[in-house]
Amino acid sequence: MSIRQEIVAVVDDDREMRMSIASLLSACGYGTETFDSATAFLNAAEASQATCLVVDIQLGDISGLELARQLAVDGFMYPIIFMTARDDESIRRQAAAAGGVGFLSKPFPEQLLIEAITKAIGCL
């Protein structure tokens, strides 16, 4: 009997942050897919095995908020945890409106990320 490993896609244009999150998630037993841009994830969305997404709001090409909107238009319904270094109430409202199930202000404690992912996966 095989147990399905939950896969988390991490979308962040900051390589160090992306790899750090992927390393943490691997250590916690999650599989990961990493993407350096919203466009890269959009191009891979159909083949992605991700259970949920961890997405930076400020990305180089398309914002994380626009990524969420485009995924919804395309029929993909991933639980999304947004993260940002520029936290304000307007961004939080936009993230919630875009379907975000979690919101983290960078830098954030590792445990908050794991709790947010556990919550996101529980939303399925």
Image (cartoon, rainbow, N blue to C red):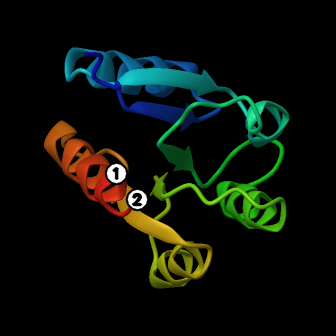
Horizontally, residue 91 falls left or right of residue 6, namely right
> Could you say which quadrant of the image residue 99 lies in?
bottom right
Residue 6 in the image, given as x and y percentages of width and height: 37, 32
- Identity, as a three-letter code, of the amino acid under mark 2: Leu
Q: Indicate the secondary structure of the residue bearing disc 2.
A: loop
Disc number placed over residue 82 in the picture, else none: none
Horizontally, residue 116 falls left or right of residue 33, namely left
- Residue at 34% over, 51% down: 121
- How far apart marks 2 and 1 lie (CA) works out to 6 Å
Q: Which residue is mark 1?
A: 121
- Residue at 67% over, 63% down: 65
> Could you say which quadrant of the image residue 71 lies in?
bottom right
Q: Are marks 2 and 1 in contact (CB under 8 Å)?
A: yes
Q: Residue furthest front?
A: 1
Q: Which residue is mark 2?
A: 124
Looking at the rendering, in which quadrant would you find the N terminus? Answer: top left
Horizontally, residue 118 falls left or right of residue 82, namely left
